[in-house]
Image: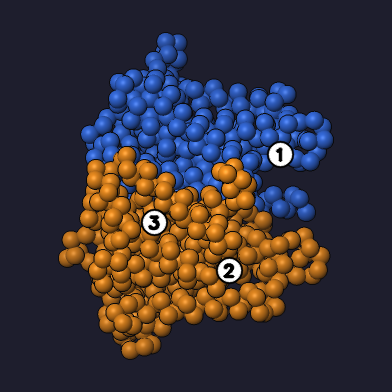
Amino acid sequence: MVIITRPDFFYLALRSSTSLFFAVLAVYVCDVAGIVNIAVEGMMLMSAFWGMAVSTWTNSSFLGVVGGILSSIILSYLFIALYLKLKANPIMIGLSINLFSAGFTVLLLNAFAGSKGTSISMKSKVLPNLDIPVLKDIPVLGDVLNNHNVLTYITLVLIPLMYFMVEKTKWGLRMRAVGESEEMARNLGVNVVSVKSFVILLSGVLSALGGVFLSMGYVSWFSKNMTGGRGFIALAIQAFGGRSIYLSSLLAFIFGMTEILSYNLQVFGFSVEAVKMIPFVLTMLLLVVFSKFKNQNSL
Amino acid sequence: MILRKVVSVMLAFSLSFLMLFFLVEEPTVSLKWMILGPFSRLSRFVEMIEQTIPLIFTGLAVTIVFQTGLFNIGAEGQFLVGAIGATVGALCFPQIPVVHALLTIALGVMFGAMWGGIPGILKARWNASEVVSSLMMNYIGLYFSLFLLKKFFMDHQAGYVVSYEFPKTAILPKVLGINSGIVLGVTFSLLLWFLLWKTRYGYEMRVIGKNRAFAIYSGIRVKKYMFWVQVLSGAVAGIAGAVEVMGTYGRFLWQEMPGYGFGGIAVSILASNNPIWIPISASVMGFLKAGTMIMARKTGAPSETIFILQSVVIAFLSSRIELGRVRKWLS
């Protein structure tokens, strides 16, 4: 376990937890307003595809990101229509959106890239890495924090920003009020429908950023089910962290570290499946410990 | 009610037609195989019924949980561990006729029940969301099954990742060339219908589903039910996996989530969460699944189209769309 002490280990861990940070933020904003959003997984997958596709066609990574966000926003509107207009259960909507994304992305991949697994014929334009002048020269810290993908920096800025929005602004107050009790919020004159719509759209955009990072930063292609349950892990992390996004983000980072560690374990000859199981088992354990702890507090 | 169901399936069809039309090279040929494929040859008709069997069980597994007002999104994982449990039984237990098959199913059931019971106990004891934990258990189940498969049971001569073929004593008998699991599935539908509507346990489960607070005040031991219903559900989904490997394939052959768990949710909701209708709604979904599989084999269209069909059915039937109002719009 010598690798843990090396700066590039933390560099890689930060890189691999980027999409999870976004997913956690997406789940967080919905959770504050009392919506369980399991559709994050599907939204990420959909935008990962469109990010790859649009950036390949236009040869512009920026337009790729825009395409990814748009696709996720469409899904968010679908969520809003089903949830607020047609009164469907959010978990059912989430399942439906996840299934739809899983099917539709393969259909699209097959149509545009001629493959049912990975987009070998389409290579997405990768978002640039940033070389920050001052940061670069700081020893160790520079090695860990410098030269990351743009989206990694964006998510690191978004974490405190979202926290600020939820805890300190009027909008956040409304979100929290809706999350506490819809009835009460309505009596206080909060427009519950617009708050919920806003939150779902915001969650869609955040998921999209997490998704495009996967196909346009972490790697430069799209492959079937490439989100691999990250949205669900985010859901579990959020259940643990609750309203404290910093704790959730720390956990997301620990997951990033686990992922890098697990690559190393594979090199040492551990079975791929055993290694892939680690993050999910870890999440389960966290859930057990957390629920136990929380229930003792409330009693 | 029935009209709503028919509309939902028609809508699912039309949406996927539309997509296939634009996204597939030979849309008319693909569509033909998707709809008529299951009826074009006896072997394909059998395939359709064999796709229906696991959906009956996973549909039932989801139904009993829904009736209790809970969720089970983990049927996918329960199916897989049920199948790997049966694989362990089939390849390790002594080959005594009848006894071997029974023990093999029992092991599949136990694995499934365990996988369902973990989210159940977390919910009952510590109020941890069963949605989150059952989603995690899906992935753990997938990797756990693959781990066991590759470590102990993989047939290296087969050329692809599958287990050894099961001995004859662990194979379910065929009825008219069809996996006899179908008989078991229909029997289970009747049994669970009886449980839900004709016994005290079923009554109490439905009371919890309708109004949990009321159930608590009227002295029903809600937490106990929360646990045992998930165990039962996992066991039923485990049978699905066991029956599938023992009856249809004779070996374990999945490398990713097969989609029966999520399919089971569509089946359950199409049957209004009533076990008695499950075999019929599973047949509808089995027809769609077999159709897309045949389409994928015959043309280049991906079999993942089934997910789109299922997603439309779930979305439509879980929302409150009033057909009367739609009819008014149209006229």
Front residue of A221 and B35: B35
Q: What is the distance, in whole Å, between disc 2 and disc 1 at their CAs?
A: 33 Å
**Disc 1 chain ID:** A
Label 3, label 2: how far apart the Cα atoms are: 26 Å
Instruction: Tell me, yes or no, whether the two marked residues, 3 and 2, touch with CB atoms within 8 Å.
Output: no
Residue furthest front in the image:
B331
Label 2 chain ID: B
Q: Nearer the viewer, mark 3 or mark 2?
A: 2
Element carrying mark 1:
helix
Density class for disc 1 (Cα within 10 Å; few <14, some 14-19, many ≥20) is some
Q: Which residue is mark 1?
A: A179
Chain letter, colour orange: B
Q: The disc labelled 3 sits on which kind of residue?
A: Met
- Location of residue A185 (image quadrant): top right
Please tell me which residue lies in front, A97 or B5: B5
> Residue A233: in sight, yes or no?
no
**Color style of the picture:** by chain
Task: Give the mark nearest the N terminus, 3 or 2.
Answer: 3
Q: Position of residue A64 (x, y in %)?
A: 38, 25
- The answer to whether dots 2 and 1 both sit on one chain is no
Image location of residue A17, percent across then percent down: 45, 35
Q: Is residue A263 left or right of residue B106?
A: left
Tell me what residue is drawn at x 38 percent, y 32 percent: A50
Badge 3 marks a residue whose secondary structure is: loop
Crowding near the residue tagged with mark 3, few <14, some 14–19, many ≥20 C-alpha atoms within 10 Å: some
Q: Quadrant of the N terminus of chain A?
A: top left
User: Residue A45: where, in percent of width, then height?
Assistant: 42, 39
Q: Which chain is represented by blue in the image?
A: A
Return the mark for residue B274: 2
Specify the subunit that label 3 lies on. Answer: B
CA separation in Å, label 1 and label 3: 34 Å
Q: Are marks 2 and 1 in contact (CB under 8 Å)?
A: no
